[in-house]
């Protein structure tokens, strides 16, 4: 049983990464036979992994047709951004009330730690990882594990588009466009002041600013997924 479980987990992790990176094109039907050969997995663990990804929103299932990659449309991305706003604002509101002083101090130390990498124009993927880590730390301060779990799921489903958007923000020298870290600082200052209204306003403005660029980011994503790159 443990061997079977570990095999399911192995297949699941591989498929989850493929789905997150759009290794399957949007709305593409999943060829289970090819996947079975590619991953060296039998039908049972493959099906279990695929069903888990349907439950998590990475894939869809149609009766009598099979599994499909999730869609990639401006509405889909906007829906994810709206969900992210709701989750993060609630988590931050709770954090203002529940977080311990030493936990808030630790978050401030983390911001100081990552500042040099932000300012030096670090790799976009690394910068996105730091951004996600900051927001997850905030969610954890809420004391609500479910909010953190939902945020991690959203991060994985929206990461592909966020990375494209982040690359667009770079200036011609390859450095980041100023503003991202200062937005985090405004959120942190409101949190450290235990001001839920100010914290929510800062968080909402931070996320919604990038949501407005979703349509263009989706268009770029399609060009990358369907047009061969040099």
Image (cartoon, rainbow, N blue to C red):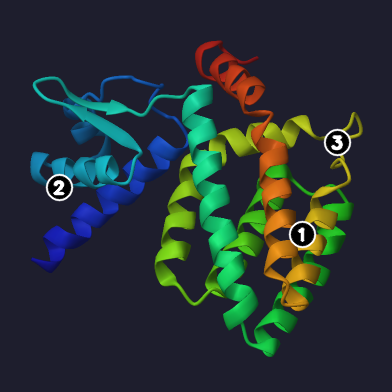
Side of 75 relative to 163 (left or right): left
Side of 116 relative to 86 (left or right): right
Disc on the earlier residue, 3 or 1: 3
Figure quadrant of the N terminus: bottom left
Q: Are marks 3 and 1 in contact (CB under 8 Å)?
A: no
Mark drawn on residue 174 = 3
Furthest-top residue in this view? 227
Disc on the earlier residue, 3 or 2: 2
Q: CA distance from mark 3 to mark 2?
A: 43 Å
Q: Quadrant of residue 170?
A: top right
Q: Are marks 3 and 2 in contact (CB under 8 Å)?
A: no
Q: Nearer the viewer, mark 3 or mark 1?
A: 1
Residue of label 2: 45
Q: Residues within 10 Å of mark 3 (few under 14, many from 20)?
A: some
Residue located 8% across and 21% down the image: 64
Image: 92 above or below 141: above
**Helix, strand or loop at mark 1:** helix
Residue located 69% across and 89% down the image: 102
Residue located 84% across and 42% down the image: 176
């Amino acid at each position: 049983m443990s061997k079977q479980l570990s095999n399911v987990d192995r297949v699941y992790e591989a498929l989850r990464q493929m789905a997150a990176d759009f290794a399957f094109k949007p709305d593409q039907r999943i060829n289970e036979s090819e996947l079975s050969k590619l991953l060296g997995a039998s039908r049972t663990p493959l099906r279990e992994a695929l069903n888990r990804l349907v439950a998590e929103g990475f894939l869809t299932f149609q009766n009598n047709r099979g599994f499909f990659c999730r869609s990639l449309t401006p509405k889909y991305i906007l829906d994810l951004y709206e969900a992210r706003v709701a989750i993060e604002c609630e988590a931050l509101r709770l954090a203002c009330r529940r977080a311990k002083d030493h936990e808030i101090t630790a978050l401030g130390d983390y911001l100081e730690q990552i500042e040099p990498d932000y300012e030096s124009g670090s790799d976009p993927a690394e910068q996105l990882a730091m951004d996600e880590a900051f927001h997850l730390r905030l969610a954890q301060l809420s004391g609500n594990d479910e909010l953190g779990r939902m945020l991690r799921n959203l991060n994985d489903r929206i990461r592909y588009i966020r990375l494209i958007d982040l690359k667009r923000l770079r200036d011609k020298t390859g450095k980041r466009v100023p503003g991202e870290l200062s937005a985090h600082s405004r959120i942190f200052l409101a949190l450290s002041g235990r001001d839920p209204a100010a914290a929510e306003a800062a968080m909402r403005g931070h996320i919604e600013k990038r949501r407005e660029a979703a349509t263009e980011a989706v268009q770029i994503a399609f060009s990358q997924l369907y047009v061969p790159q040099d």
